[in-house]
Image (cartoon, grey):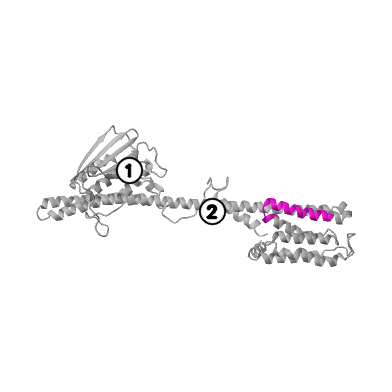
Amino acid sequence: MDLLRRLRLFVRAHPYWADALLAAVLYLVTILWPTGGRPSTQWSNFDPDEVLLVAGLCVYAPLALRRRYPVLVLACTVAATVGYMFVGPVRGPILAGSGLAIYTVSSVVERRLALAIGGVAVLSVGIASMALSPEKWDEGVNGIAFAWTAMTVAVGESVRSRRAFVAAIEERALRAEHTREEEARRRVAEERLRIARELHDIVGHHIALINIQAGVASTVLDSQPDTARAALAQVREAGRAALSELGATVAVLRQTGEGEEAASPRDPAPGLAQLAQLVDSFERSGLRVECRTEGAPVPIPAAVDLTAYRVVQESLTNVRKHAGASAASVRLEYRPGVLHIEVDDDGPGPKPPAKGGASASGGTSGFGLIGMRERAASVGGTFAAGPRPDGGFRVTLDLPLGGAGRSAASPTAADASRGPGLPRMNLPNLLGPFRPVHDTAGDPSAPDGVSTADSAQVARASARGTGDV
């Protein structure tokens, strides 16, 4: 086995030297093969052994280039073989050269062309054998010439088909692996976007309240110490809430997705049930918020509930930070199959941004509107925001009730209940290195009944068996 392995490696590394060595060996065998030393046809009186030295060179020398010029080599070997039949007997290894050339053509060219060229070569050798040595037909020698050349065509076609099959499997395996890597990258980007939205909503809301209350406290610290103490208490409460939500978010991100820890219950994601507490936090910061509900409330999917809460939270945060408004209104309307939400304010709108991109209110041109639009789209809803004709600003949100129209990437109710608004957060496996997936049985891009790993293994094994000759 070790010798065969070394021989295979040599052939792969030096194919032309290997072909030249094979041709030399066949030539030596041919000239040493006994011919009887007499002419075998009525067409010539030359000594077959002497003619064989020249004919053998013409047959085997071109074989060194059979991989580069297969059709030309075949023509030379068949012509030399037929020419030798005018002098020497059909028996002997002289047919090996033409057979090897026929095999090479059949294994590398397209099937129809291979069959056509191989058929011409088989007929040429066979007809020449019968025409030049008719007295030997009864001995079966001419039949052997026919069978040998025809067999090389069949073997070459079989090898070509096998190579095409192996190439198809390798290509499908690579395509399947590439598809899986692209899917992994897409999922990572999607999860990162969800994390960014969640962190923006959590941190942005509480930091805005802290900034406002800290400003109030610094302004009235000397003149109204009681008001300053109340503002600082609000700062402490907002900081505690932010730390709590961030801690819960980090806990979700650290889940491994396995074992008891992953299966343990988590705090539910915020929703419209916590809308009263949200409104109260804004009212304590000095923003009057009117909240009303129209229509009969119905059960809301967890993902839709979370989206509605976060959009209202971000809208009120923007009102407090940028709009310069003293009052805002939140209207929830339960329509057939749709939850309609409007958030209005009476402010003049944000001030022109200062140099460097920061607004005069201390905020920045962040991703609030972008995040709200993405949240709505993730559950199949629609989002709109813009100034009202009579002044102020309006945010409008329509969310499907019952999950109709939800995209394939939207979170499920079970996902949303895992943590504070981070659905499907089994991220340690997603954010790690992209490893090739070898267990893809049933992958539509792989052949029926063959997995990606099996395809690659079959391809490697088949290439070792057919790629050297």
Which residue range is magenta in the image?
A: 106-129
83 vs 93, nearest the viewer: 83
The question of residue 119 being in magenta is answered with: yes
Q: Residue at x 83, y 56 (%)?
A: 128
Instruction: Note whether 352 is above or below 279 in the view shown.
Output: below
Amino acid type indicated by mark 2: Leu
Which mark's residue is nearer the viewer, 1 or 2? 1
Amino acid type indicated by mark 1: Phe
Q: In the image, residue 187 lies at what x, y percent? A: 42, 50
The question of residue 20 being in magenta is answered with: no
194 vs 237, nearest the viewer: 194
Q: Quadrant of the C terminus?
A: bottom right
Helix or strand or loop: what does disc 1 sit on?
strand
Q: Residue at x 18, y 54 (%)?
A: 214
User: Label 1, label 2: how many angstroms apart (C-alpha)?
Assistant: 41 Å
Q: Earlier in the sequence, mark 1 or mark 2?
A: 2
Mark 2 sits on what residue? 174
Name the main secondary structure of what is drawn in magenta. Answer: helix
Q: In the image, residue 140 lies at what x, y percent? A: 84, 52
Q: Which mark is residue 383?
A: 1
Q: Quadrant of the N terminus?
A: bottom right
Q: Residues within 10 Å of mark 1 (few under 14, many from 20)?
A: some
Q: In the image, residue 175 lies at what x, y percent? A: 53, 52
Q: 146 left or right of 307? A: right
